[in-house]
Image: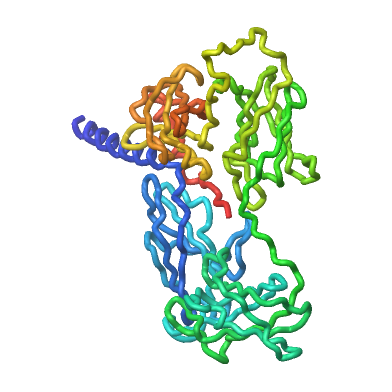
Amino acid sequence: MKSMIKKFIAFTSVFVMFSMTSLVAFADSTSPSDVENLKGVAGDGLVNLSWDPATDDVGVVGYEIYWGESSVTEPGQSYDNNLDVGNVLEYRLEGLTNNVNYYFSVIAYDEARNESEAWATELMLRPLAGDADNVPPQVISAEAISKDQVKIVFSESVSLPEENPEREFSIENQDTFELLEVLSAMMFEEDETNSSVILETETQILGNEYKLTVNIGVKDLAGNNIISGTSDTALFSGSDTERAVVDTTGPRLLSAEALDDEHIVVQFDEAIVLSLDPSENFVIVEKNDANVKLSVLGVDLGTSDAGVENASALIRTGKQRGVEYIVSAINVLDESGNSSRVSESTITIIGKGDAPTDPVDPSPEDPIDQPSTPAVLVAKFMAKTVFENDAMVVKLSWDILSETKDLIEAQKIYMSKNSDKNFSLKDSIGPTETSYDVVGLDAGDYWFKITTLDIDGNESEGLVTGKIRIAETGPSVIGLLMLSIGLGGVIKRKKRV
């Protein structure tokens, strides 16, 4: 009998240890951060890759290298090859073919096999015969991207001289043998591999063939000069295309008007892009009582009065009253990804509903223009539960809008156990925090709210999470355990490109 009891205790201990390990693995659903700063040097049939360490709430345990001969630029595409290289920050990948352009990326993964949500910024390298530290850069291509700009692509990352880099490039008209003046030279900012250069030239002749020559002042990151007479030239045809204007200004809210008591139309000065949930992009509150919020039930884009497609938004609202409302556009982007400034994203309208039945006349002693509650200055307020240190933890996270970060003096976290309205203050935190852990909660339902305080001490209305349920221990935990045992081997999130 004693022997049977000992075996039962031993089996129970192993099962409990395995159960807790499985539970933690199942509870960890947070992906590691994307891999940043992917770099590489091409050698003879090989490349040497390196990257910065990724982060994870539990810990990164390894990395996978992906590569192929085609660039991955669209969602759903993938690389031809991949290799799990373990928990390292650099790797020598051999067996490649010389004089072939290869495209590389890296992802990180944790112990629960959660993977980075996005590829590392793609890196292009071209293996060449010779020692990796002595291979000079080569010109791969040259292209006129406008009538006064030429883009040059090199075989690897390069650097330009600090002074007068334009002198390292010459362009000759192949018909007249006259030189096309190079006015400036700079690295192409959108190419994070640092293997592309943009030249500004005098006006080209459409269709004429030009020969570009790169001088020895252009070097790779190992200090190797480009070699004169060896892959230092390229041909391109002249263009008459106007130079693209770089858009760095976010959309501006021009007007807003209540069409009826359930619809408001707002117009911007350019086409806009909304969030996956467009109702998050607009906040409408009563001017005299910002705690009274008008529900946003849906948003449809349309053509503005100026004829610009997707520059107008029709907002379906709850029943309006005949009072003044403040309409705020939150994190509305243009097609170039620029976000509008707060000062250009708020406008006042008059609702189309019935006027208040008991209007209050301001007394001479009361100021007529009362300060209104400002719009919340954060977005994407989310909550999730994870199992950490043998306890359930509610992890709150949010984004601080880049254009509003200087307006926040403090933030407040509120919590409610009864509904999504009766909140009590949980904690006050600094103006730059974007996450908060709530621990020690009993079983039950919870709601959380975050507000911001501006420089005048005015507190915003706030954003509220959905209901968060903390389950009882015992059967609920065992159920979670069995689910983790049964499904742990088949659940895997798909990476996006």
Provide residue 360's location: percent of width, then percent of height.
61, 10
At a point 61% along the width and 66% down the height, the residue shown is 71
Please tell me whether residue 294 is drawn above or below residue 483 in the rendered image.
above
Q: Residue furthest front?
A: 364
Q: Residue furthest left?
A: 2
Q: Is residue 370 left or right of residue 277?
A: left
Judging depth in this view, the residue of 287 and 114 nearest the camera is 287
Provide residue 252's location: percent of width, then percent of height.
66, 43
Please tell me whether residue 243 is drawn above or below residue 133 in the rendered image.
above
Residue 61 visible? yes
At a point 55% along the width and 65% down the height, the residue shown is 189
Q: Is residue 394 left or right of residue 341?
A: left
Quadrant of residue 4 within the rendered picture: top left
Provide residue 394's location: percent of width, then percent of height.
41, 32
State the colouring used for the structure image: rainbow
Judging depth in this view, the residue of 30 and 273 nearest the camera is 273
Name the quadrant of the N terminus.
top left
Please tell me whether residue 341 is drawn above or below residue 422 in the rendered image.
below
Residue 46 visible? no
Figure label count = 0
At a point 42% along the width and 29% down the height, the residue shown is 412
Provide residue 375's location: percent of width, then percent of height.
55, 31
Q: Is residue 304 left or right of residue 23?
A: right
Name the quadrant of the C terminus.
bottom right
Quadrant of residue 234 within the rendered picture: bottom right
Please tell me whether residue 199 is drawn above or below residue 371 in the rendered image.
below
